[in-house]
Image: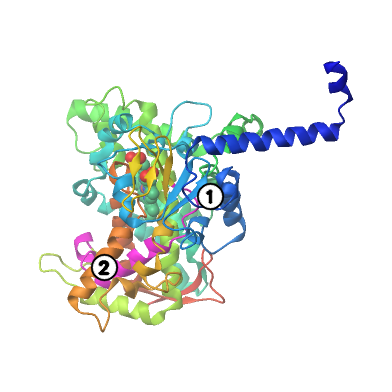
Amino acid sequence: MALTTLISISPLYAAALGLVGFLVCLVVNSKKYKLDHIPGPFIAKYTDAWRAYKAWSFNHFTDGNNYQTELLGKYGDVVRIGPNTVLVLDPEAINTVLGFKERLEKGPGYQVFVIRGTTQTALVGIKDEATHGRYRRPIANAYSLSSLKGYEPYIDQTINTLTDVLDQRVTDGKAINMSDYLHYWSFDVISTLTFGEPLGFIQHGNDFNGMIKAQKAVFRHISITNNMPLLDTIVKMNPIPKLLQKKPNVFFNFASRVVKERVSQADVEKATQKTTNEKGQQIHKDLLSNFIAARPSYPDVMTDLRITHYATTNVLAGANNSALAMDRTIHYLAHHPDMQEKLHGEIMNTKMDDIKDTEGPPALDLALKMKFLEAIIQESYRTFAMPSNNLERLVSPAGLTLPNGVRLPPGAVAAMNGPALMHRKEIFGEDVDVFRPQRWMKGENETEEQFAQRRLKMDRSMLPFGSGSRTCIGRNVVQLELYKIWPHLVKTYKFEPVGDVKLHNVWVTVKRR
Ligand code: HEM
């Protein structure tokens, strides 16, 4: 009888039943997480698809703000953005969610960093603190401020390669797309810092091996699937992209070759105590040489394969965001010749007794004294178009009380988003959508004390690099890059916009000063 009834059900009826069952599952799933006391968009309560869609449409259609920023002021400082996820928009909560005290594990959205076909993840994707510490410790020293000083010549060398191109444009009068060239520079500089040699983007003058296109696609994928990890699982299980992949992974192969060469070279150098290589060149003191030097102390972590992964993710993680920040700066400078002049004046007038002014890029210590330069760099970090992924942490079995008193149950995911925090009007001013470096400096009608207080609030709400033990390991590297390139470029050239200059597509003509 039951079988006859089942067979006689019309497909429409079966579909309706299926739909009801599906909706019931969504409701039960949503209730399970005990987050009904947190307000948020209605659909987000039941599915992560809402925010994945928002991230997708932001990537494809908007030049404006990500969905997290759009949520500011709508539901309060804690917003439910998924059945089990809340977005914390209160800067006071940065230490509670991301800080050293709680040391919360990373949330499910970080599974996007697991390398396809393996169980290995990039450093950023390691979830638990103990394992993360084990993998971060051997390389941390390579990124320290003291090591960075040794990398300055690599940056200078790559800046000079870029200025060769700019000098050519001064001579032939042709316009140049600085958004593209800064992206090339960003790749070449991080590759030189890491491997001692550039990838060669500036020399080629184009995305010659397709890496930039591929990297942008990876970032788009991450920004969507971080919001809905299930999508990442589905995409990674799909064998078709792998089958269609015609070219071998050019970059990984390049990295493996260099690591192999350098590991055997390091063995020879150690045995012979040499300070120059067989070509008579000074032995590398780049990031890779620091990674290799850590091998004897951490033999189980610092395998050749792991070193190759550290080096490759360095380039992939490092180049894109730095390029986006620089794109903001050149866009601003191209539009504001008066601010180019102001910065030029500051560069020419900043001196230090023990540092000689040289023809080339300035010493880092000198550049760090330039207040207007600092304001421009801070403003580029504040506004650079970071996509829609969140810094997620898993609430521990003890539960978590946020500074504003909101209580999150064990197992909930607390998410923070830099761009949203850096767009809070009561902290950064009403004109948060405008690139205005002056907000980082003392206003005409402000006392020193008022400025110090305002500045402190802004500094405490800045989150471009994350916070706590998982903070960006390369943040000093970016500082070094930006504090060296801009003084040199603005000291040497004037940039004039060509046509209607848009972000990511800043065409300029270049004149020598
Ligand atoms: C403007 C440029 C950059 C921005 C805005 C940026 C931002 C970030 C953020 C937000 C995180 C993740 C924090 C978290 O998950 O809680 C991170 C991690 C990381 N970044 Fe950066 N980054 C930049 C440049 C770089 C550079 C130049 C390098 C390499 C030299 C780099 C290497 C890394 C690595 C390896 C991690 C993982 C660190 C860990 O989990 O211990 N980043 N970065």
Question: Magenta stretch?
Answer: 363-390
* Kind of residue sitting beneath label 1: Lys
Work out whether 458 lies above or below 137: below
- Label 2: which residue? 455
Specify the quadrant of the image occupied by residue 323.
bottom left
Name the side, left or right, on which 316 lies relative to 273: right
Mark 2 Cβ inside 8 Å of ligand 1: no
Q: Residues within 10 Å of mark 1 (few under 14, many from 20)?
A: few
Give the colouring mode of the picture. rainbow
- Toward the viewer: 261 or 290? 290
- Toward the viewer: 264 or 127? 127
Q: Secondary structure at mark 1?
A: helix
Specify the quadrant of the image occupied by residue 165.
bottom left
Question: Which circle marks residue 216 in the picture?
Answer: 1
Q: x, y (%) of residue 350?
A: 20, 73
Specify the quadrant of the image occupied by residue 233.
top right
Which residue, as the protein is rendered here, is positioned at the far left?
A: 353
Q: Residue at x 22, y 39 (%)?
A: 276
| Residue 198 seen by the camera | no
The Cα–Cα distance between marks 2 and 1, rounded to whole angstroms, is 34 Å
Q: x, y (%) of residue 416?
A: 41, 50
User: How many marks do you count on the picture?
Assistant: 2
